Amino acid sequence: MPVVEAVITVPVPPELAFAVSQTVAPERYRWDPFVREQHFTDGATRPGKGVLTFTRSRHGLAMVSEYVSFAPPTNVGMKMVRGPWFFEMFAGGWRFAPGPQPGTSVATWRYNFRCRPAFLRPVADRVGVWLLDRDIRRRIAGYAAGCADPVVLAAARRALSTEA
């Protein structure tokens, strides 16, 4: 099963790094170049295990995903519930750990997927790795910019203060 991964060090501690990754509109749109539209479904108002989200990508593709793990400030995992026809399976996990310097974090984002139909998988998986690798690198770079954006940081801090 193909896997793509990106790692970056950001200038904020893990709890804030995690909170930035979970920001919602409109702040999410300031840093996340992949997302054109994103919202919780079924009446949910915040992330958590079992919560569903709708996402429309910059490519115009839509996906409903479910949080399968939610463990602030260290990790979050999601899996596709419904999505583009060419994905048989898609899942992702984001991890946050203390960085090499005090007050920094290492963010590791990993996606895995399986394409369909099976007879096209050898080619489709290679194309998928190429496309998703480009997207994950753009996205994690945008996330790093969000970790330095005062508007995004203020929203992340507000979310942390309401969780306490």
Image: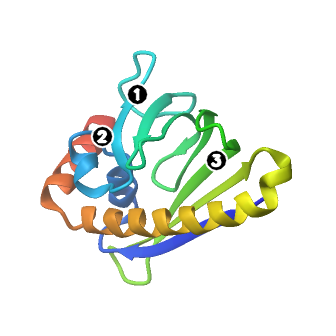
Secondary structure of the residue carrying numbered label 3: strand
Q: Residue furthest top?
A: 43
Packing grade of label 1 (10 A; few <14, some 14-19, many >=20) is: some
Mark positioned earlier in the residue sequence (1 or 2): 2
Compared across the picture, whether 107 is left or right of 78 comes to left
Locate the C terminus by quadrant. Answer: top left
Q: Is residue 120 above or below residue 24?
A: below
Residue drawn 68% across the image and 63% down it: 3
The amino acid type, in three-letter code, at marker 1 is Phe
Q: Position of residue 25 (x, y in %)?
A: 25, 39
Residue 54 spot, x, y in % from top left: 45, 31
Sequence-earlier tag: 3 or 1:
1
Residue 137, quarter of picture:
bottom left
Q: Describe the element under mark 1 as helix, strand or loop.
A: strand
Residue hosting label 1:
40
Q: Is residue 161 left or right of residue 46?
A: left
Please tell me how crowded label 2 is: few (under 14), some (14-19), or many (20+) other residues with Cα within 10 Å.
many
Do the residues under discs 1 and 2 have CB atoms within 8 angstroms?
yes
Q: Which residue is mark 3?
A: 91
Q: Mark 2 — residue?
A: 24
Q: Residue most toward the left?
A: 150
Looking at the image, residue 20 sits to the left or right of residue 135; the answer is: left
* Circle number at residue 129: none
Amino acid identity at mark 2? Val
Residue 110, quarter of picture: bottom right
Placement of the N terminus among the 4 image quadrants: bottom right
Q: Is residue 77 above or below residue 106?
A: above
Q: Residues within 10 Å of mark 3 (few under 14, many from 20)?
A: some
First reached walking from the N terminus: tag 2 or tag 3: 2
